[in-house]
Amino acid sequence: MKKKILFSKMHGLGNDFVIVNTIHQKFFPRPKIIRMFARRTLGIGFDQLLILRESHSSRFDFYCQIFNSDGTESFQCGNGFRCLAKYIYVNINKKPFHIIRTKKHTVITSIKDRGKEITVNMGTPRFISKKVLTVFQKEWLRQLLTFEKEYNHFEMVNIGNSHLVFIIQDSKEIVRIFRLIHSSLRINELFPKGININLMQIINRKKIFLKVYERGSGETKSCGSGACASVAFGIKYGFLNNLVFVYSEEGYLKVYWKGRDYPIFMTGPATYVYDGSISI
Ligand SMILES: N[C@@H](CCC[C@H](N)C(=O)O)C(=O)O
């Protein structure tokens, strides 16, 4: 017999999510079901599926499972956590702060102005040594970028998930690299655990433009963890101020980082699209 699953569709600057609240319904989807729901023509369509679960620890308010549209699991989702905070505010309780645990990471959400502005404490950024890159990964990067050009800096940053961040100042170059990434069948082979790829254009010390190709979801309209990873990189090298406006196609996020050993904060909107149900 078919089962009806209730869900809410939300987005953060166009990075879209399906939230399934399991407090009153059971939902343990297999990757095949997740991929089916994620299909924009035949399913519901989303970049990530967020499954809200009760926390069995007094240290956390809720537990959240995150799945990319290809069915792989993730442990961090900045834009998604803003949407989840708003979902909780509208449907569960009006507390201003929530501690949310994923399988490997903890974030704290705070809600202001009746949900108009939501901030997420995303944890402390960690820079990953380039020594971990394999010969094949380096070769791929060499093909992707023109290393002779001084502006082609890159860093690997962990914000609870892994990001490769590149500084690409030329807009045409951003388009060229994005096309290459899209047509490169080798990314999954080269990075078996997956990687989020961020192309950052520094407009000035407090404004960047960002394009992201996400692990497990492909090109997305915005990426909260990518915004934090990029700003952390820019601040580490003295290119950016502590507060940065991260622009993408649908608007901007505000990212604040004091520097090394401090957590990074991301602020932005969360938008309800609709509530629905789907049969499985
Ligand atoms: N859209 C997210 C990031 C989602 C997870 C990512 N694709 C991964 O698997 O690491 C965000 O806003 O942070």
Image: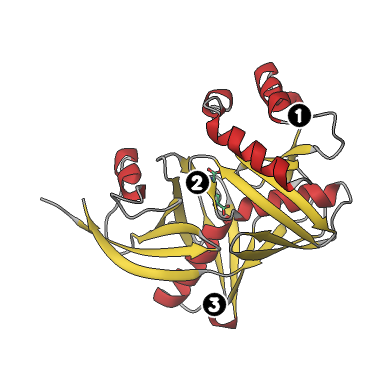
Front residue (pair 171, 187): 171
Q: Is residue 260 visible?
A: no
Residue 178: tell me if it is visible: yes
Residue picked out by circle 2: 103
Is 270 in front, or is 208? 208
**Taking 144 as reference, is 202 left or right?**
right
Asked if disc 1 and disc 3 are in contact, CB closer than 8 Å, the reply is no
Q: Amino acid at mark 2?
A: Lys
* Image-quadrant location for residue 6: bottom left
| Mark found first going from the N terminus, 3 or 2 | 2
Q: Mark 1 falls on what kind of element? A: helix
Image coords of residue 135 (percent x, y): 70, 17
**Residue furthest toward the front?**
172
What type is the residue that disc 3 sits on? Gly
Residue at the spot 82% in from the left edge and 61% down from the top edge: 242
How is the model colour-coded? secondary structure
Q: Residue at x 45, y 45 (%)?
A: 68
Q: Circle 3 is placed at which residue position?
A: 115
Which badge, 1 or 3, comes first in the chain's sequence? 3
Task: Give the residue displayed 58% in from the left and 63% down from the top.
Answer: 250
Q: Is residue 254 left or right of residue 53?
A: right
Q: Secondary structure at mark 3?
A: helix
- Which label sits on residue 7? none
Classify residue 243 as left or right of residue 34.
Answer: right
Task: Indicate the secondary structure of the residue bearing disc 2.
Answer: loop
Which numbered disc, 1 or 2, marks the residue that appears first in the sequence?
2
